[in-house]
Image (tube, rainbow, N blue to C red):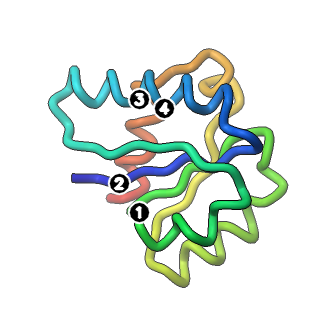
Amino acid sequence: MIKIFLCCAAGMSTSMVVNKMRKAAEEADIKAEINAYSISAFETEVKKNDVCLVAPQVKYKFAEFSKRCEEENVACGQIDMMQYGMMKGKEILQQAINLKG
């Protein structure tokens, strides 16, 4: 089971990406728990997950979040703007899996 959280501004568009990722995981028979949280919830959620993906609209927080993730042994990456905008759930899920290693 891989636990992934997407960190975003408010969670509206990101929740749609999460749904696409969940569908991709189900189709590929990958056990995954995928959720979206606002940047204000980052500190609470980081310890509960394996991978943090930072949405394009909050990429300015990536350096800070990446450092904090490293302290908690959580993989961290930025979601590509094109993949995010086109809601490419399968590709974003694969990014998370690759980050976890």
Q: CA distance from mark 3 to mark 1?
A: 16 Å
Residue at which label 3 appears: 21
- What's the CA distance linking mark 3 and mark 4? 5 Å
The residue at which mark 2 appears reads as 3
63 left or right of 60 in image = left
Q: CA distance from mark 2 to mark 1?
A: 5 Å
Residue 5 locus on image (x, y percent): 49, 50
Report how far apart the C-alphas of labels 1 and 4 lie in the structure: 15 Å
Q: Mark number for residue 49? A: 1
Residue 94 vertical position relative to residue 38 in the rendered view, above or below:
above
Task: Give me the residue at 63% from left, 27% from top.
Answer: 84
Residues at discs 2 and 1 in contact (Cβ within 8 Å): yes
Q: Amino acid at mark 3?
A: Met
Query: Which mark, by number, is residue 18?
Result: 4
Name the residue nearer the viewer: 73 or 42: 42
Instruction: Choose top left, top right, bottom left or bottom right for residue 91.
Output: top left
Q: Please rate how many residues cluster around mark 1, counting C-alpha atoms within 10 Å: few if below 14, some from 14 to 19, many from 20.
A: some
Instruction: Indicate the position of residue 86 as horizontal and vertical percent values.
Output: 62, 15
Tell me the crowding category of disc 3: few under 14, some 14 to 19, or many 20 or more residues within 10 angstroms, Cα based. Answer: many
The earlier-in-sequence mark between 2 and 3 is: 2
Amino acid carrying label 1: it is Asn
Residue furthest bottom in the image: 71
Contact (CB < 8 A) between labels 3 and 4? yes
